[in-house]
Amino acid sequence: MKKLIMVSNRLPISVTKKEGALKFYKSTGGLATGLSSFYRNYESKWIGWPGITSEKISKEDRKKIRESLLEENCYPVFISQSDLERYYYGFSNKTIWPLFHYFIQYAVFNKNFWEGYRKVNRTFAEEVVEFARKDAIIWIHDYHLMLLPRMIREKLPDASIGFFFHIPFPSFEVFRLLPWRNEILHGLLGADLIGFHSYDYARHFLSCIHRLLGYEHMLGQINVEDRIVRVDAFPMGIDFDKFAGAVKKPEIQKEAKRIKKKIGDRKMILSVDRLDYTKGIPQRLECFDLFLERNSEYREKVTLILVAVPSRTGVEHYQILKRQIEELVGKVNGRHGTIGWVPVWYLYRPLPFNKLVALYSAADVALVTPMRDGMNLISKEYIATKVDGRGVLILSERAGAASELGEAIIVNPDNREETVRAIKEALTMPEEEQIERNRTMQERLKRYNVTRWAQEFIDRLEHTKELQRALQVHRITPQVRKRIIGDYSKATRRLLLLDYDGTLVPFAGKPSRAQPDPELRKLLGGLTSDRRNEVVIISGRDRKTLDNWFGPFDVNLVGEHGVWIKERGEDWRLIEPLKNDWKEEIRPILELFTDRTPGSFIEEKEYSLVWHYRRANPELAAIRSRELKETLLDLTQNRDIGVLEGNKVIEVKKVGISKGKAALNWLEKENWDFILAIGDDWTDEDVFEVLPEKAYSVKVGFGFSRAAYRIESPEKVRELLGQLGGKSDE
């Protein structure tokens, strides 16, 4: 059995100290409750803060807390009061929480908060690394620990790391407001799998990754450095049987009857939320007020039970919200109440499980209308308790649960008219329709419960690691490197076919950049000084640039992806006779797309035209490049003109001209003892395709390739060539 390490801000067990004695109790919250049973199925540890700051406990207390929590497979991370203020109350709750829930006006961008957040994430990383083995599964939860995946990856490069967001992930326009946005994204990309409650949140994250860091994705799969990272949606479930079964317990049935007796023959609407500005409680009260105003026939016939669970009581915004809610409750009751009828019953307290389930069971309608919510498990819990099928759920379209509970009455929480109509519809809905809707939702919630949610996430994480390992099978391991160096040393005639951009140097933003640096010059000098070597640089660049850059070296050159060939000591020659008459027809099309895509530009070579879009807005460029490619393919389908898609470029040139055809010029000359070809994009696949079986073909980076081996980066390519004889490290 693999070791599972769960990591979250809070442990499922909390600690307090009263009158010198430590007290242990179960933590509240969906995460702690939902996963407390699942994680016990593994050889596991749950790492998190126990809820008490370092200053309040002695060394002996720490020891006792550790020992007691280890009995429950939990391990504490101790945090000082000052760090808690900056990390939790500061950055997590005053920066990330409001920003990610679209309450931008409440977001505070404070560098001191950020430093505290980074410090505590580092503390968590140290504790995790202490426990983790190589084969451990590390599952990190929520926005408090977004830097943690990268920090762990630095210490445990082969670890299986998953990260799950339990809150919304905002759109790019909102996320970009965060001053430390890139650091957050890099931190998250340390994970192998990043999960969200809904596809919308995953889509927003992928958009931010694309637009801020330049990473593209294919069906949620991102190539990050030397790893594949997957992004997907996993809507969190509940322990359905626990809630459905609890309704049948005598003590809960008794409590439900007591509630109904107090309500009388009135209809009961239930609202349960943590006191938070994201939950839309004031707007809900205003809608109920308007409903009573518009529908006088329901006066004295309906009661709203409003449960607000205290939260962040020391934060000013929450204190203001509490006063606002209390004033609204008073206003509604004052306007509509009569002797013997209070329209709103307001409960400002947490409720134990039995009382909560009894309320769910007794309620005719659940009014769940957050302004923004990652998932909202209350809506699912309510449906689970409807064992007889009767009851109506009104649900905000901005709750993650709305994508699963489509049979509920879905409303826009900002549309008061729509919400008022929904309340009327819910109170008048025929029982047959209630039962039909709820049975459908119940079957769905039964199938995708919290255990299946967690297991599916772990299974997908392990599948991602298998995919990574499958690609790593072809990496240039120390053993493969040793074999390449050995074969190179024994050979008397060697052919080295080397791409340039993205292979010997990283990609640059403009064609004029990326000329050989001193290290690369030294490397090429070492390789070409050995007369047993034939070095060929096969590039997409024009021949004038190649002459300027490589004139001093005794190398063979290929320009414009195979159009031009220059052998050592000779002049440039065309690979075959070519014409340029097609350019006048193609150039206006490229110019049109350049005008429509700010940041893109056209590079004109002697026998090709190239449209570059590396510096354009990534999302716009992705759309425009597809449009341009389709346009060019339609225009050239009956001609000998080809459309070649490279790394952030689209090139138009004569069909049949390729790097592979150019490489044959040298491959067919001799019976080489040793052949090494290295390249990084689609244009280099033509070279790999024409190589003999005995050759070493190497793809730089990840992605599908005909190459036999993979290497991580241009830096690693230089390191390998230096070991062969380039001596770049001297």
Image (cartoon, rainbow, N blue to C red):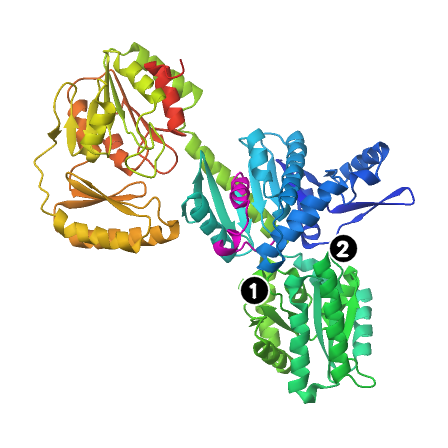
Give how far across and how far down residue 214 sits, in percent.
Answer: 41, 44
- Amino acid under label 1? Arg
Q: Which image quadrant for residue 484? A: top left
- State which quarter of the image contains the N terminus: top right
Give how far across and how far down residue 511 sits, in percent.
Answer: 28, 37
Q: Is residue 659 magenta?
A: no
With 220 as the anchor, is 235 left or right in this view? right
Is residue 248 in sight in this rendering? no
Mark closer to the chain start, 2 or 1: 2
Q: Is residue 172 magenta?
A: yes
- State which quarter of the image contains the C terminus: top left
In the displayed structure, 17 sits above or below 153; it is below
Label 2–label 1 contact, CB within 8 A: no
In the displayed structure, 236 sits above or below 41; it is below
- Amino acid under label 2? Gly
Query: Which residue in the structure is indicated by mark 1?
Result: 398
Q: What's the CA distance linking mark 2 and mark 1?
A: 27 Å
Query: Which residue in the structure is indicated by mark 2?
Result: 314
In the displayed structure, 372 sits above or below 214; it is below
State the residue in front, 170 or 161: 170
Q: Which image quadrant for residue 255? A: bottom right
Which of discs 2 and 1 lies nearer the camera? The answer is: 2
Considering the numbered disc 1 on the image, is that residue within a helix, a strand or a loop?
loop
Q: Which image quadrant for residue 184? A: top right
Q: Number of labelled discs?
A: 2
State the residue in front, 251 or 117: 117
Give how far across and how far down residue 134 sits, in percent.
Answer: 58, 29
Give how far across and how far down residue 240 sits, in percent.
Answer: 66, 59
With 114 as the anchor, is 505 left or right in this view? left
**Residue segment shown in magenta:** 167-192
